[in-house]
Image (spheres, rainbow, N blue to C red):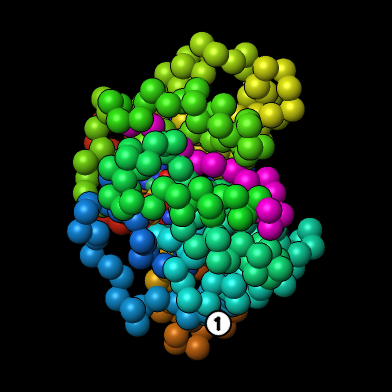
Amino acid sequence: MDLPDPAPRDSGAAPVPTDGPLVDRYGRVHRDLRVSLTDHCNLRCTYCMPAEGVPWLAKPDLLTTDELVRVVEIAAGLGITEVRLTGGEPLIRPDVVDVVARVASISGPDGPLEVSMTTNGLGLQRLAVPLHEAGLARVNVSLDTLSRERFAEITRRDRFDDVIAGIEAAASAGLAPVKINSVLQRGINDDEAADLLRWALEHGYELRFIEQMPLDGGHTWQRSQMITGAEILAALREEFTLTEVPGRGAAPAERFLVDGGAAVVGVIASVTMPFCGACDRLRLTADGQLRSCLFARGESDLREILRSDGTDEEVERIVRTCVAGKLAGHGINRPGFLQPPRPMSAIGG
Ligand code: SAM
Ligand code: SF4
């Protein structure tokens, strides 16, 4: 089903299946759960949050590890096969290795869950080996520039060397493939597309560019500042031959073979080329709210049910209802689009 940027509010009561896979009314089967381990972060990327940070979630509201693991177990029973741990910065959760070990020991319909993580890389020098031993399969590390000075400007912290060392630690620990996420901003780092790809190829990392989305805590996103997927591809094609890899499935990244070789580069054009029609993702925030989309304006409260002795069946019912009510698309390009109240850092990117 191809839904380029469908109306987000084409609802009507959605029938809620009582068994079978987590399917919504558009036939999308949900297999990928993104779990935010914290909304806090040790960087302050300009496209993500203001210098002073954002209003943090109240500590007592954060799911305990037992609560989080219970939700993942129930989700695995409903057909989830992949869990991506994220945040905020997931590596600043003190028991992150234990969380990985417990989540990686859960089985879904295809066997043990595949557990990956999106991280800014700052904790990887210390944690890559224990995370790998605990069952983490791979990491996506965010890096937007190869310049130490620009890194400090973009993240408002002088930690470039630590991120590079973290990426190297991930690769040597066997967290493969190491994927690199880059966001380009106009007039800031948009001249680095080809440099980043050359660097990634040299080191055997898989690079993915992400279009900047209207999800920042400071509400500063401007369409004119966003470097589009088309601009990124045009810049890369000045230096490389890119051949589209067919069979994208539910993956957000459109992938291209580089110079006909084994290496690939990805472009996640969430704004200009939405891929909602094949989306199979659900998100659990650090405070126990289930979201069917990054851009959803509504959430389903799992924390309340977990803390009031709710049964697994009651939790399942909420998960199924959340999926059933998922809208056709995010609607960013439609008049009247409203940025969700939660910033990306508090949803889990
Ligand atoms: N702190 C971790 C990190 O930076 O990788 C994980 C959370 S972060 C919210 C997840 C991903 O979202 C990162 O790759 C980051 O670059 C990206 N991101 C954050 N804000 C964004 C925005 N407004 N538009 C597009 N991507 C964004
Ligand atoms: Fe932190 Fe990730 Fe947001 Fe940067 S993008 S401020 S590293 S949560």
Q: Determine which residue is flagged by label 1.
A: 66
Residue 189 in sight:
yes
Q: Is residue 304 left or right of residue 334?
A: right
Residue at 65% of width from left, 75% of height from top?
A: 102
Quarter of the view holding residue 62: bottom left
Q: Hey, which residue is sitting farthest top in the picture?
A: 238
* Closer to us: 280 or 215: 215
Residue at 51% of width from left, 48% of height from top?
A: 164
Residue 96 to residue 337: above or below: below
Q: Is residue 118 left or right of residue 188?
A: right
In reply to whether residue 161 is colored magenta, the answer given is no
Coordinates of residue 338 in the picture (x, y in percent)? 26, 43
Q: Is residue 79 left or right of residue 240?
A: right
* Closer to us: 208 or 33: 208
In reply to whether residue 184 is colored magenta, the answer given is yes
Residue at 36% of width from left, 61% of height from top?
A: 42
Residue 165 to residue 180: above or below: below
Coordinates of residue 157 in the picture (x, y in percent)? 31, 53
Q: Amino acid at mark 1?
A: Asp
Circle 1: element type: helix
Image: magenta residue range: 172-185
Residue at 79% of width from left, 63% of height from top?
A: 111
Question: Quarter holding the N terminus?
Answer: top right
Residue 307 to residue 83: above or below: below
Q: Residues within 10 Å of mark 1 (few under 14, many from 20)?
A: few
Coordinates of residue 320 in the picture (x, y in percent)? 56, 62
Quarter of the view holding residue 186: top left
